[in-house]
Image (cartoon, coloured by chain):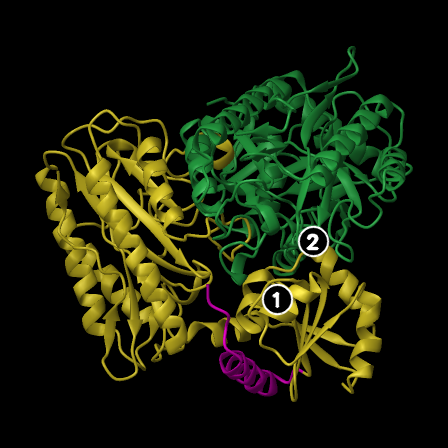
Chain colours: A green, B yellow
Amino acid sequence: MRITPREELEYRIGKLQRFMAEAGLDAVIILQNADLFYFTGTIQNGTLYVPVEGEPLYMVRKDFPRARMESGLKEVVPFRSMKDIPPLLAEYGYRQPVRIGMEFDVLPVSFFERYRTVFPEASFADATPLVRRVRMVKSKYEIHILQDAAVQVEKVCQRACEVIRAGMTDLELAAELEFIARKEGHQGLVRMRAFNAELFYAHVFSGTDTAVPAYVDTPLGGLGLNPSFGQGAGYKRIEPNEPIIVDFAGCVDGYLVDQTRVFAIGGISAQLRQAYDDMLKVQARMMELTAPGVSWGDVYETCLALAVDLGYADSFMGNRGAQVSFIGHGIGIEIDEYPFIAKGFKEMLFEPGMVFAFEPKVVFPGEGAIGIENTFYLSHFEGLKQLTCSSQELTIL
Amino acid sequence: MRITPREELEYRIGKLQRFMAEAGLDAVIILQNADLFYFTGTIQNGTLYVPVEGEPLYMVRKDFPRARMESGLKEVVPFRSMKDIPPLLAEYGYRQPVRIGMEFDVLPVSFFERYRTVFPEASFADATPLVRRVRMVKSKYEIHILQDAAVQVEKVCQRACEVIRAGMTDLELAAELEFIARKEGHQGLVRMRAFNAELFYAHVFSGTDTAVPAYVDTPLGGLGLNPSFGQGAGYKRIEPNEPIIVDFAGCVDGYLVDQTRVFAIGGISAQLRQAYDDMLKVQARMMELTAPGVSWGDVYETCLALAVDLGYADSFMGNRGAQVSFIGHGIGIEIDEYPFIAKGFKEMLFEPGMVFAFEPKVVFPGEGAIGIENTFYLSHFEGLKQLTCSSQELTIL
């Protein structure tokens, strides 16, 4: 277990304050768990008030002693209700804010309305792009945690080699892999930011089930166990000579990496093997291109064009009609952070410190899906480095 | 795997429409996954438009063929963007809505703003209380699924008896129990509705760790593995003569039950044993009281008064200073449904068909926590019935 160091928190808050000054915000109010963890080091129930200058104030409802213990911030105080906020701010000498930023992409309407009554004179703006921009550049401290998560997901792959056998269900395989990850310290919960986005540990499925599309914004989906959570492993039995996909989110101390590997008993079709090699080529192209100053959207367009050239116009990144418009996504405390290696985003540029998963995949309905995913880190001095470390060979059992 | 029957969906929609008529709403737009599953039978990415009269229209972005397969609704149509909504509604002969209800407790501000631009003439109101009131009364179909979930969680208890041993960590025990639940068809994901509410399968912890409070709105918390998700099992090793708490959410086909049982190696202190017996008395009092027409708040007040009389003013439902103001909560597709057996709610009355978990618990800091939790069903003809079915004896191993 790590406690986020105070200097780490101070650096993050300082960066947010610079972005706030540029955006003309007097204050940002942080409420959502992932953002709270990033800026305070804990998620005890409360409100983080960040003024454009000076110390942030973390007002905690439950559990205050625990927040005081877990957070490296200087000012952590108890409070009971939202009505206590203005007097608390006055007590700590903060000016009445005129323009306040909040996390509009995750904040429910009813919560927002309550905060509006707390600050009836203020105007409100969306602070999400600022928060995303701070969080997208990882520190050395964060990279070290991500490296631990990469080791965890490699252990999951090793376990897959041990347990996969013909006749077991996708669910049984998923359960075995979740079990090993959990014992290795996975917190279980995998956070996604987008509304209605949900994920369990992983997408583990085989054969034709790898080609079933789902509601979730991912290239592969899976049937799942039932229509209430229709993604991931279902009850299909694993057979020889079909792809078995293990797309797994490793998680250590709140930080996630994403890795996909393919296994098969006996072998797979020539078409799928060719497609796998071609997805490695798409990954190689991305690795050549990605550098500080290059646009996220340009990397997307170039890699998409290569996949189309290789013959995958109708199968790349999902079933025809259900193709997603990204190939990679930032990752850290949440699965869907900046950068988005996606359609659009031509103006957004890679910077050192960014961490992202890149997942070129193809889907052939009725046959199966295949592809690869790794989590990468754009280092300050050594270019693009791969964090996830499992063998990239197809594993034939 | 069950597909929700069409008559079930039609009954639910009809009930919502009656509430909408009473509330003066022309339409309700349903977006959140749990509500989508309840009213459409699936969660494929889309917008459910429910007019106050006539057929609902489920507009689906991804994956449309799958939504058509999984949903029993008559009108399921593909769409691409929010701009398509008004022309689609016109095409299907719906009048322009003047007053629209949406799920304000879960809908992010930025989504709401986009829907406002789609219906610039309309006014908007919170539809959450209506949706909650429809969902709180369960059908026979739903009760059957909940009974299956109760059987699953009993298997988890049986497994606990097999695997608990001195020296194993709380995490190892949690992992074993999650593993068995998963193999029994648990979908993994446990849905909570409240903003920032998060839960994994369970709270599994022992001894002093049972008394650690957390950010989450539950009587017990737990340290967890790290401050990013500070609840549930941690790395404490299980020892003889301390309570081991297994608070587990069983889940089958999207429906949850909640059950807490206590295990110990050797035995527990006289104080804890007395407290356990006293919590059974609080449960018995609730069972005597709960009937159609009785108020949720009255049951709460009476049971709280009994706990105070029994000597638990400072320990009931959480550590002193971090006590929660409820003893029970409705449950179904989400952990935190109506009814709330909680402070206030004097005007809200029990009705046949309601399902709720009741969890009288006490916490003695530095020693441990103890209590019981069962999921109950207020039947139409036979009074209050208990769905969860594990033995209520303390399990001494």
Please give the residue where the numbered disc 2 appears in the rendered image: A365
Please give the residue where the numbered disc 1 appears in the rendered image: B103
**Residue density around tag 1, few if under 14, some if 14–19, many if 20 or more, within 10 Å:** many
Q: Residue at x 79, y 35 (%)?
A: A20
Above/below status of A172 relative to A358: below
Q: Are marks 1 and 2 in contact (CB under 8 Å)?
A: no
What amino acid is labelled 2 in the image?
Answer: Pro
**How far across and how far down the image is residue B160, in percent?**
24, 42
Range drawn in magenta: B1-25
User: Which chain is indicated by disc 2?
Assistant: A
**Residue density around tag 2, few if under 14, some if 14–19, many if 20 or more, within 10 Å:** some
Q: Residue at x 31, y 66 (%)?
A: B147
Left or right position of A55 against B84 = left
Left or right position of A358 against B164 = right
Above/below status of A191 relative to A388: below
Does the image show residue A127?
yes
User: Which image quadrant for residue A229?
Assistant: bottom right
Does the image show residue A254?
no
Magenta-colored stretch includes residue A55: no
**How far across and how far down the image is residue B129, in percent?**
53, 72
